[in-house]
Image (spheres, rainbow, N blue to C red):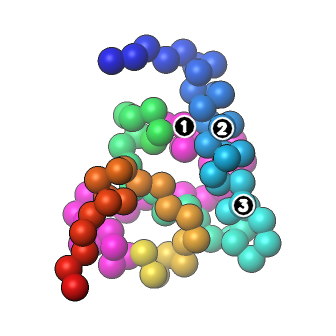
Amino acid sequence: MRSMTSNDFVRAAESVWVNHLQGSAEGDKKDFPIFFSTDFEKPLGFATLLACSSHLKKLFIPGTFNSSKIIKSLPSQGSNYMVCDEDLYNIELPQ
């Protein structure tokens, strides 16, 4: 367990934005939301929410943690960027 201050979260949010999400606000990608499937209680989740809200970037937050439902909703969002937990990123899809 690690304790984080508000300043730590602000620095993490800016790092997430600059290093990973800034391109989502440019060109033809600017109107599409970032697909967000992680826990707000984790540092990545909260930093992503803070980064997007401070740069007026939309987030699409699915109302489920059901991987099948999440994957099925990806095309309808038109998202070019996704923030997710490592477990979802590494999931083996049926063939």
Q: On the rendered structure, is 7 left or right of 92?
A: right
Q: Which residue in the structure is indicated by mark 3?
A: 23
**Number of callouts:** 3
Quadrant in the rendering for residue 32: bottom right
State the CA–CA distance, disc 2 to disc 3.
13 Å
Q: Is mark 3 on a helix, strand or loop?
A: helix
> If you read the primary sequence from the N terminus, does the residue marked by circle 2 or circle 3 appear first?
2
Quadrant in the rendering for residue 31: bottom right
State the CA–CA distance, disc 3 to disc 1.
17 Å
Residue ID at (55%, 44%): 48
On whether residue 56 falls in the magenta region, the answer is yes
Magenta residues span 46-73
Q: In which quarter of the image is the N terminus?
A: top left
Residue ID at (66%, 38%): 15
Q: In this view, does 17 lie above or below 29?
A: above
Q: Residue 15's mark?
A: 2
Q: Which residue in the structure is indicated by mark 1?
A: 47
Q: Is mark 2 on a helix, strand or loop?
A: helix
Q: On the rendered structure, is 6 left or right of 40?
A: right
